[in-house]
Amino acid sequence: MAKLLEGREVTAALKTKHQTEVDGLLSKGITPTLGIIRVGEKEDDIAYERGATKRCEAVNVAVKHFVLASDAVQEELIELIDGINADALIHGALLFRPLPKYMSEDKICNILSTRKDVDGITDGSLAGVFAGRTRGFAPCTAQACMEILDHFGVELKGKRVAVVGRSLVVGKPLSMMLMGKNATVTMCHTKTADLPAVCRSAEILIVAAGRAKVIDKSFCSPGQILIDVGINVDEKGNICGDVDFEDCEPVVDAITPVPGGVGTVTTSILVEHVIEAARRSI
Ligand code: NAP
């Protein structure tokens, strides 16, 4: 049976660390504060907002909510972000995407100050990740994968890692971060030839394809560590990953569950980034 890499173990360790860090900031008169920006009333956004707020407040990170109507014009959102950039009492901001189609997501994301970009949505933050410099923040999901590997003591130096998916939210920044830890990374996508063979040859396989259960045991090999970033709904209405857990689990050495894996850790990384943004603001 594969070892289960449970997110709650990682978040428990992070929570203890965060509490100490926040106490230190509070003693200096600084309350780390996250601004959450939401356009409209999408159920998924509201659920994530609720979870993130709870996780922040559990360690005394404050949250301010900014909600615009689903038909808000782009200028309203720009004005709101400008206000957050200018507000010294808000250290980080989370903007739910996708934005309404009539808005320019690229333009709006880059209005946010890189210093407050705690979810890596600005070109400045991504440049920092790609150059290996402390500038802005990595996307929380990509960093959550790194945190899980680190927490469970997975050595990356010299390892063959395959990443399935090349989005700017997960696959690309994650590949750069893995390379920063001296892994040998193969980035895979829909045009990758013989994807099962490429995946099988990896010692660590990370999947962020956005397709329910697209990875079955034919992509896996014994000894492998399998990280499933996917969050999908299956034919029965249950949450499932991009990995077919039942099929792959008997083959690999360790695997993240869905739910209860990467998604759980992502919110804690958001908290971590808000604390770090507050610390950098001193
Ligand atoms: P995305 O923007 O849709 O990108 C998907 C990537 O996977 C693309 O690069 C695509 O290749 C590749 N891909 C899709 N199907 C493939 C296949 N059959 N074989 C090989 N490559 C394939 O998705 P995303 O935003 O990165 O999200 C990926 C997954 O992570 C989703 O399930 C999402 O729900 C989940 N997610 C989880 C969290 C979390 O906190 N756990 C956060 C964000 C996202 P091409 O580039 O060739 O099209």
Image (tube, rainbow, N blue to C red):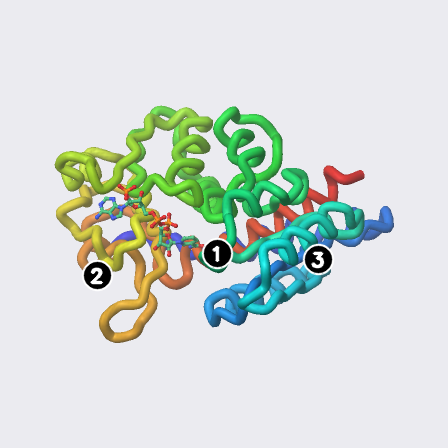
Residue at 25%, 75% (x, y): give it: 236
Q: Is residue 229 above or below residue 179?
A: below
User: Marks 1 and 2, Cα distance to the nearest angstrom?
Assistant: 41 Å
Q: Earlier in the sequence, mark 3 or mark 2?
A: 3
Residue corresponding to mark 3: 61
Tag 3 and tag 2, C-beta contact below 8 Å = no
Q: Secondary structure at mark 1?
A: loop
Badge 2 density bin: few <14, some 14–19, many ≥20, Cα 10 Å: few
Q: Nearer the viewer, residue 67 or 178?
A: 67
Residue at 51%, 43% (x, y): give it: 106
Badge 3 density bin: few <14, some 14–19, many ≥20, Cα 10 Å: many
Position of 130 with respect to 255 (left or right) is: right
Q: Earlier in the sequence, mark 1 or mark 2?
A: 1
Residue corresponding to mark 2: 246
Position of 106 with respect to 166 (left or right) is: right
Query: Does residue 152 appear in the picture of this structure?
Result: no
Q: Nearer the viewer, residue 182 or 235?
A: 235
Disc 2 marks a residue whose amino acid type is: Glu
Residue corresponding to mark 1: 102
Q: Nearer the viewer, residue 150 or 50?
A: 50
Residue 91 position, x and y percent, is: 72, 48
Q: Is ligand 1 within 8 Å of the beta carbon of the residue shown at mark 1? A: no
Q: Is ligand 1 within 8 Å of the beta carbon of the residue shown at mark 2? A: no
Quarter in which the N terminus is drawn: bottom left
Residue 248 position, x and y percent, is: 21, 53
Q: Is residue 159 above or below residue 73?
A: above
Q: Earlier in the sequence, mark 3 or mark 1?
A: 3
Disc 3 marks a residue whose amino acid type is: Val
